[in-house]
Amino acid sequence: MAEITDYLVISGDGAELKADPFGESLAFACGDCGHPVVAVAEKGQRGSSIENSSVCRGCWQHYVVEVRESVEKIVVYRAHEL
C-alpha cells in the first residue's frame, strides 16, 4: 500500500493538477469535463493499470495513475496516452 497524502499530482504532460491525494486514494478533476474522478494507489485497484483504469462518470474518459514514491509525485495519464 502506498501512502500518497500530500503528493504533488501532475498530468502526463507535466502540468500540475488540482487533486486531493489522501491515504491510498486520489481524487482529481477530469481533464476533459471537470467531473471528479477517484483512483486508488494500490495494485489491482481503480486507476492502477489500463486493465483497471479509473473512469470519469461525466464523459467516460479512462485514467491510469503512476505513483513515484521517491519524489512524492503522482502522474495521471489518460489511458490512451500509454
Image (spheres, rainbow, N blue to C red):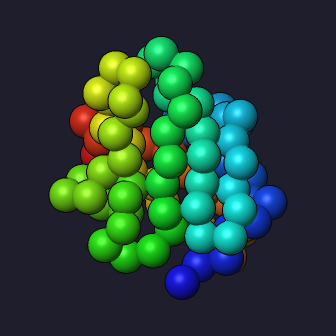
Q: Is residue 5 above or below residue 32?
A: below
Is 63 in front, or is 60? 60
Q: Is residue 3 left or right of residue 32?
A: right
Residue lying at the far left of the rendered structure: 51
Instruction: Pick the residue in front: 14 or 21.
Output: 21
Rendered-image quadrant of the N terminus: bottom right
User: Quick one: which residue is furthest to the bottom in this view?
Assistant: 1
Q: Classify residue 81 as left or right of residue 66.
A: left
Residue 44 locus on image (x, y percent): 31, 73
Asked if residue 12 can be seen in this view, the reply is no
Residue 48 left/right relative to 26: left
Q: Residue furthest right?
A: 6
Q: Is residue 28 above or below residue 61?
A: below
Count of number-bearing discs: 0
Q: Residue at x 60, y 54 (%)?
A: 26
Image quarter for residue 3? bottom right
Name which residue lies at 37% across and 30% down: 57
Outermost residue to the top: 33
Residue 25, by quadrant, is bottom right
Q: Residue at x 69, y 56 (%)?
A: 21
Determine whether, in the image, residue 24 is placed left or right of residue 6.
left
Residue 4 visible? The answer is yes
Residue 31 image point, x, y percent: 51, 24
Which residue is at a point 26% across and 58% down the rendered structure image? Answer: 52
